[in-house]
Amino acid sequence: MKILIIDDEIEIIEILSTLIESEVECEILKAESGKEAVSILDKHDDIDLILSDYNMPEGNGALVFEHNKKKGNIPFIFVSGGYLEDYNDVQNFYEANDKNAYIHKPIDFEELIKQVDQALGPKDDERNNSGYSHVHLGLLSKYSYVSEEIFLKISDDKFIKIKNSGDSSTEEIKKYVEKGNLKFYMNKTDFVSFMERAISEQSRKLLTSPAEVSEVEICGETLEILQDSLIQLGLTTDQLLLINTTIETCLDILGSEPALKEQLKVFLKGKGYFVSHSLTAAHICFLLANKLGMGQDSIVNKLLYSALLHDITLPESELCQIYDIEDPVFLGLDLNSRKRIKSHAADCVAILESSDKIPGDVLTIIKEHHELPNGMGFPRGSTETNIFGLSLIFMAALRMADHIFHHGHGPKSLDMLLCKLT
Ligand SMILES: [Fe+2]
Ligand SMILES: [Fe+2]
């Protein structure tokens, strides 16, 4: 079987091919742009499946999809950080072939294999039943694998161990690489934990690294464009770098805390409004704190934690964007959703309280993030006089993030935003 994988991020190609090869015996063809993929499709008529990113500089995923539709119309899986609904140049995606599928980044191993299985229907003898999986050298060189055992393949069913678990030296591996051996294997258990780590670190890099933010699709807008509009609001590029590093540090600290691992996963796997408004609010908090002369690390960190975590108990985008409980949209929801909206701030605080890494002020900010200075907020209807100062900044940032989400980032929208604020 032959699979074509297309992504301008070589590491994603390595992750996808490593995951697929661990389950199915197949040949992988790679393309780093839509244009390159089109020329590969023209040269090969024996490809069984295409996995493609959407957002790529040299010809996007829609170009490959349309070309394939006219040519072989082989099963096509989008693996993307954005949302199919936002891709206006992709028409009749599911109608074109009932095996077509969409997978959202960060990649979920089981979901990926399920979709690949559905598209390819591999026979028993095309499965990898050896108990060992090949791990791409590119991934081994990027991610630490101290606790994993490493094997070489001698024959179809014979593997020899060349590194023990707990051995942190990579000398042995280097020696084999120098001899020209480029294929290293892990047993299935080690493989799964290593790949989970690689995927989560990779997706975290995507969310926070300024060099790669252009790859992150947030509701059809790239974070980079969003950041451009924040620069128009007064954020400097140095601050942008600083804020991305700070978000990364916050995510690292949260990831190292066992009690918060699940919450962090919710964030990294979240989508749409949920992730978009959290990240936008983080940027705006930084901007506001600096404008107000409160740019000290300790204050900025508290605001960033709040931005990343405040809706973690309400990750459904249609629910976490409700700010007004008098709104007909809220009143039209079922009882359980209304209850969850009203209690999500307190629910979140209850989870975070177990960690000693989260400053008390963050709990206060999160508890109050739906209160309003005029007393019309929820759940307590607190007023300006008893709302914590940092909570007021955070609320403003949330409203601005919401505005940017709904009205875009164009100059008109930003003018409107500035009018509202002054
Ligand atoms: Fe929110
Ligand atoms: Fe909320």
Image: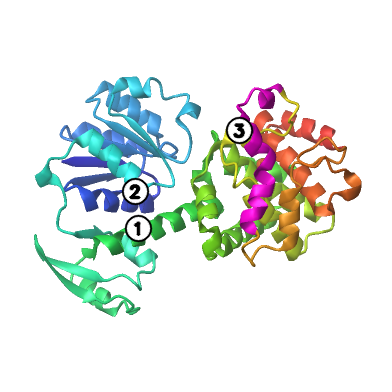
> What's under tag 2, amino acid-wise?
Phe
First reached walking from the N terminus: tag 2 or tag 1? 2
- The answer as to whether callout 2 falls within 8 Å of ligand 1 is no
Query: Which of 416 and 85 lies nearest the eye of the viewer?
Result: 85
Q: Residue at x 74, y 65 (%)?
A: 298
First reached walking from the N terminus: tag 3 or tag 1? 1
Residue 378 % position (x, y):
77, 39
First reached walking from the N terminus: tag 3 or tag 2? 2
Label ID, residue 195 = 1
> Given contact means CB atoms under 8 Å apart, are the residues at marks 3 and 2 in contact?
no
Q: Which residue is mark 2?
A: 109
Disc 3 versus disc 2: distance between alpha carbons? Answer: 30 Å
Q: Which residue is mark 3?
A: 337
Instruction: Classify the position of the C terminus by image quarter.
Output: top right
Q: Residue at x 74, y 34 (%)?
A: 414
Disc 3 versus disc 1: distance between alpha carbons? Answer: 35 Å
Asked if the magenta segment contains residue 200, the reply would be no
Q: Main secondary structure of the magenta part?
A: helix
| Range of magenta residues | 328-352
Q: Count neighbours of disc 1 (C-alpha within 10 A) and say few if under 14, some if 14 to 19, many if 20 or more.
A: some
Disc 2 versus disc 1: distance between alpha carbons? Answer: 9 Å
Q: Nearer the viewer, mark 3 or mark 1?
A: 3
> Given contact means CB atoms under 8 Å apart, are the residues at marks 2 and 1 in contact?
yes
